[in-house]
Image: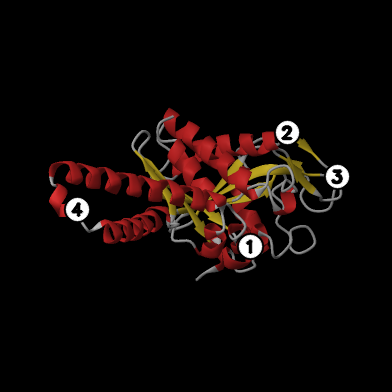
Amino acid sequence: MSRALLHDLRRWRFWRHFAIHALSAIGLVALVAGLLDVFFPDIAEGAGRWLTIGTIVLALVYAFVRSWPRPIEQQYETPNVKITLVRGDILTQDADHLVIGMQTTFDTETPKIIERKSLQGQFVEKVYGGDVKRLDTDLEQVLSGITPTTTILKPGKTKVYEVGTVAVLEHPTRCFFCVAYSEMDDKNVARSSIENVWRGLDRLWREVTDHANGGTVAVPVLGGGLARLSQILPAQDSIRFIILSFMFACRHERVCDELKIVVQPAQYDRLDRLEIQAFLMSLRAS
């Protein structure tokens, strides 16, 4: 049994749903047994003990089946879109397009400015084979039509673009949406805010609408790592934040067919996944 599953089974939400389903099953069986006793009293005579045992076993089995943690996903009819939550590395996901968080300076140099272990650092290594110059060339080509808002005196890149700027890197098989939602200071310390994340997501969905042509878009949990938002916007809240932003955008116009939120294993194992599934289900009627 996986650690993630054990984590779910220890949650109060699981046992609350389990108790509700078990009591519902017992109530249904009791209702049927009462009706049988009224209309066919001879059938139930002498079967009280076995009927009680059977009812309890049936109720427990039914409750476990209904409450057992399942893959976190939700299909919606209005808008017609699917949202899933998965555990793993976003760069290895089977998705049509990927989202990469960046800074408003679009710095790429590793390891002095960008940590190799960060998503952006892994993006350079796995997608560009460590070729920072090629990535810079692609970014400069895309950003050439966008006017910087200011400049900053610091090591690395000095042009500063508006928060929410999205550099769409079109590769032969997919697009990479590099969204700038954190800002660098003169010491190359990146910081962000909830407002910046929201602005970044808003611009991101517009670019996805224009370039993705449907399909599945994978997005990481935003706000942790270099953005230094984990205390203000922990992973659980960041996921809800992303979902709400995406649903608002989808109700304005079609964004994509599926949003896949990819959570790093260490974060995923600490999530209240039953709460997230309940949150996804609650959006069906809103």
Q: Is residue 168 left or right of residue 199?
A: left
User: Marks 1 and 2: which is nearer the front?
Assistant: 1
Q: Are marks 4 and 2 in contact (CB under 8 Å)?
A: no
Q: Amino acid at mark 1?
A: Ala
Q: Spatial distance from mark 4 to mark 2, Cα to Cα?
A: 81 Å
Q: Earlier in the sequence, mark 3 or mark 1?
A: 3
Badge 4 marks a residue whose secondary structure is helix
Q: Spatial distance from mark 3 to mark 1, Cα to Cα?
A: 36 Å
Badge 1 marks a residue whose secondary structure is helix
Q: Spatial distance from mark 1 to mark 2, Cα to Cα?
A: 37 Å
Pointer 3 residue: 153
On residue 149, the disc is 2
Residue at far bottom of view: 1
Q: Spatial distance from mark 4 to mark 1, Cα to Cα?
A: 54 Å
Pointer 1 residue: 266
Identified at 53% across, 36% down, the residue is 244
Q: Residues within 10 Å of mark 4 (few under 14, many from 20)?
A: some
**Res 283 → quadrant:** top left
Image coordinates of residue 142 in percent, x first then y, are 58, 46
Q: Nearer the viewer, residue 22 or 98?
A: 22
Q: Amino acid at mark 4?
A: Ala
Q: Spatial distance from mark 3 to mark 4, Cα to Cα?
A: 87 Å
Q: Nearer the viewer, residue 138 or 284?
A: 284
Q: Earlier in the sequence, mark 4 or mark 1?
A: 4
User: Marks 3 and 4: which is nearer the front?
Assistant: 4
**Res 90 → quadrant:** bottom right
Badge 3 marks a residue whose secondary structure is loop
Image coordinates of residue 135 in percent, x first then y, are 62, 58
Q: Residues within 10 Å of mark 2 (few under 14, many from 20)?
A: few
